[in-house]
Amino acid sequence: MLDGILGYFFIGLAALLGLTQLVARDWRWNMGVLALQYLVAFVFISDAWPLELAAVKLVAGWMAGSILGLTRMSLFADEPNLRDLDRTGVAFRVFAALLVLLVVLGAAPRLSAWAAPIGLNLAWVALVLMGMGLLQIGLASGVFPAVLGLLTLLSGFEILYAAIEVSTLVAGLQALITLGIALVGAYLLSAPTMEALE
Amino acid sequence: MSAAILWVGLPILLGAALLLLRRASEPLTIALAVGASLILAWIAWQVPLDTPNQLGPFTLRIFPSFSVFGRSFIFTEVDRALLTLTYTGLSLWLAGSVLAQPGRLFVPSALMLTGLLVAAYAVEPFLYAAPLVAVAVLISVPMLAPPGSEPGPGVFRYVSFQMLAVPFILFTGWLLSGVEASPGNLSLTLRAAVLLGVGLIFLMSVVPFHSWIPMVANESHPYAASFVFLYLPTLTAIFALAFSDRYAWLRDRQLTYELFLMVGNLVVLLGGLWVASQRRLRKMLAYAVVIGIGSGLQAIGLGGSLSVEIFFALLIPRGFAIWIWAVALSAFEQVSNQPLALDNFRPLARRHPLLTIAMLAAIFSLAGLPILAGFPPALELWGALGQVSGLAVGAALLGSLGLGVAALRLAWARLRPAPAVAANASARPETEDPGDLGNPYAWFYFVFSLAVLLLIGLAPRLFLGDLADFAAIFPQIGP
């Protein structure tokens, strides 16, 4: 289903989304990108899993995005939506993302070769998301972008793992981890404003 | 009743209940948690599994396995020793929170964390332990960054590194099914070993992925941080032993043990250098934990049942010493307005001699000073390493020397002549800080700590004699 032009479309989309996640200055763009990333993940996972099980991933991902978005919106309503990122910073991130894509270009065929259930297009999308997520974590200057990076990385891994194992328990645990990371991120963002427990 | 419900479900449920009641009386919360931990430890110690046991008017039968969604949580007779140790240790940490005051989230979080780590230990296939450890890590975050505090970058780095282990471990599980089908396929076993190794490096916080430990030690309450530092890497080391026990292709390769030994040497050596150069006590504690992780790796690298015995022999005194250090450091920081360092230690130590002596004894015990609890297992480790590699025993000794230097610097910070001008204007004045000589809790802590450290050090066979019970957990790791 995901071979040919449709597969290439999603690979390009995943790369574009990963890049946007890195360079977007408005956090609302980040949330939109995260939602689309989970949609891409759902498309690939549903190729290997029953639709209802794949939907768990999508729902968990969107819920995670909602948690983060609502927290960001309510806590920092008075702050500008734009983060401080100048042209040099954008150029550096684009360059770093291109390096990651270069690595993925070489790694994905090898991964697909020795892990037969993992198709080439799936390997590309998964590794792109994992690479971009790792880059996002490394370049993050705060909790919010770091959480987004971690969610991106794990969404990429979930695509890979879905191709090799179908397990209700693992799906549940991974959804729990996704929601847990979002909740932890929301907690760390809001902890300074919470009332201390004496 | 299922063993999983008892040793996994009950702590998690109790922790959740205490979390909801976190604004209730703190002594009551602690007493409930300590009581529950002690009961769980006693049951693990005294009550055999899968056998009807008469307890007064009640009959208790603990079923060893519990299934959920096709996966099982299985406990066997040989696991009882580890469960006893785990929940006895937990009760000690919970009781110590009376002195340490780590915050109201510590008790519920510690209970839930322990329950989840025990679940990770018991789950079959045990590769599903990685997601359970990940959930445990997430639950521990509020304990490390309580409400009202400004979380530093260390806590999220801790979360990130532990989460990064999950993909590697889960992927290894899939590869291992292929390895079991064709164990002669060298490339497959090599890939599985590499992925497993990377996953364990993240989980066990091996250098350079240990960086979250000193960061979290600096940002979080020392008692809560120390609890996480002790329980999480210890479980993952047990995880590594379980891998070695389960898979012959891993166990029978000399390279496996050489790698553990090599990495352990590096970690211990670097930890020793770092701990000796620290001025802040929190970071000293953090690097002492790093040295402990390295020692555990060295013990695993010895191979054979001796490796398991030495691992657990090191664990018990080390865990106790870290507890003593964490309690003392926490109590000190309650009266100080700033993080404790060598520069501002003297006036506090002068007013709190009991805490000071206990803390120094703990650090010297970690360094392996004779007559203290850490010496017998350290000597055993050094002797065993000496037969394998001169480099390994050199690294171990340098690591211990680093801890010894740190302890001596701390002692000198207390004993050196007072500076001409009092520089510590921001600490509580002496009139507000009554010291610990009049505090009955401090006396109990002091006597208990020193008594246990000395008793284990002077009579190790009495207290560490049942280590063969732990070796039975890993029957395939033979002599």
Image (tube, coloured by chain):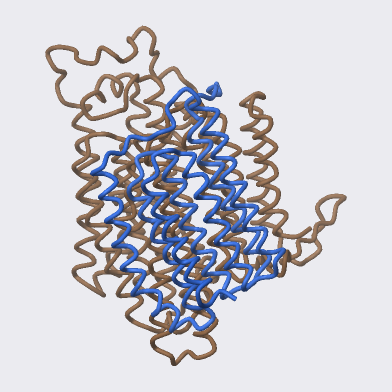
Residue furthest right as drawn: B57
Vertical order, A9 against B449 (above or below): below
Horizontal arrangement in the rendering, residue B342 relative to residue B45 (left or right): left
Q: Colour of chain B?
A: brown
User: Residue B454: where, in percent of width, then height?
Assistant: 38, 45
Horizontal arrangement in the rendering, residue A84 relative to residue B413 (left or right): right
Give whichever of A180, B225 is nearer the camera: A180
Residue B17 appears in the rendering: yes
Residue B450 appears in the rendering: no
Residue furthest left as drawn: B420
Residue furthest top as drawn: B431
Q: Colour of chain A?
A: blue
Image quadrant in which the C terminus of chain A is located: top right
Quadrant position of residue A69: top right
Vertical order, B445 against A163 (above or below): above
Quadrant position of residue B122: bottom right
Give whichever of B178, A53 is nearer the camera: A53
User: How many circles with numbers are drawn on the protein?
Assistant: 0
Quadrant position of residue B60: bottom right
- Give the residue drawn at x 19%, y 27%: B415
User: Residue A23: where, in percent of width, then height?
Assistant: 36, 46
- Give the residue drawn at x 36%, y 69%: A104
Vertical order, A139 against B475 (above or below): above
Give whichever of B376, A71 is nearer the camera: A71
User: Residue B311: where, in percent of width, then height?
Assistant: 41, 63
User: Residue B412: where, in percent of width, then height?
Assistant: 18, 31
Vertical order, B468 against A33 (above or below): below
Image quadrant in which the N terminus of chain A is located: bottom right
